[in-house]
Amino acid sequence: MEIQNIVASVDLKGEVNLDECSVILQGEYEPEQFPGLVYRLEDIGTVVLIFRSGKMVCTGAKNREQIYKSVERVREDLEKKCGVKFHGEPEVEIQNIVASIDFHVPLDLDTIAEVLVGDEDVEGIEYEPEQFPGLVLRLREPKVAMLLFYSGKAVCTGAKTEEEPEKAVKKIAEKIEKYGLKLTG
């Protein structure tokens, strides 16, 4: 399993003059297109969207450390380069973690959909191969969505912690194997 993206919302605790900061920070700001300043932190590997209210969204991180480095850098740049005054410590909340998984064997999506319909741990299953080639499986706990593909590849989305995708994969693997389908090649 590999984390592909972590999205976090942040309250920086200070108002930001986006017109001024976009020039100083060389960010992208077109208020008629989007109300936030797009600030790329290429050395960290993240992109942040900064809003006038001091709210921010950080995306592109592969781990929490990158989120916190991004927040620290943005606050430092806004304070030192743009003169923004902050009132307290930033509040960071993970909104979504996306992970990719490879089961290393083809998945029989028709059978998986059939056997997991009505399972107590499954909130919902959608599988319409004419519309989308993957099976969408929503779990109750952890509350995530898994996209399973015939190739054996999968994507987990909606996680709030790094452990949730691992728990989801384990739970799905156990359920599938319980019905006699093999996930190990």
Image: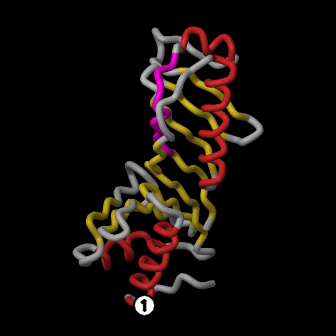
**The N terminus sits in image quarter:** bottom right
Badge 1 local density, few (<14 within 10 Å), some, or many (20+)? few
Q: Is residue 168 above or below residue 40?
A: below
Q: Is residue 88 above or below residue 172?
A: above
- Residue 90 image position (x, y, % from top left): 50, 40
**The C terminus sits in image quarter:** bottom right
- The three-letter code of the residue at mark 1 reads Gly
Residue 108 left/right relative to 78 = left
| Viewer-closest of 37 and 144 | 37
Residue 25 left/right relative to 33 = right
The number of numbered badges drawn on the structure is: 1
- Residue 7 image position (x, y, % from top left): 51, 45
Identified at 32% across, 59% down, the residue is: 126
Q: Is residue 3 above or below residue 19?
A: below
The residue to which callout 1 is attached is 180
Q: State yes or no: residue 25 in magenta.
A: no
Identified at 39% across, 60% down, the residue is: 145
Identified at 74% across, 35% down, the residue is: 42
Quarter of the rendering containing residue 72:
top right
Q: Residue furthest right?
A: 43
Q: Considering the numbered disc 1 on the image, is that residue within a helix, a strand or a loop?
A: loop
- Residue 9 image position (x, y, % from top left): 46, 41
**Which residues are the magenta region?**
8-16
Residue 90 left/right relative to 121 = right
Identified at 65% across, 48% down, the residue is: 66
- Residue 158 image position (x, y, % from top left): 42, 55
Q: Is residue 43 above or below residue 178?
A: above
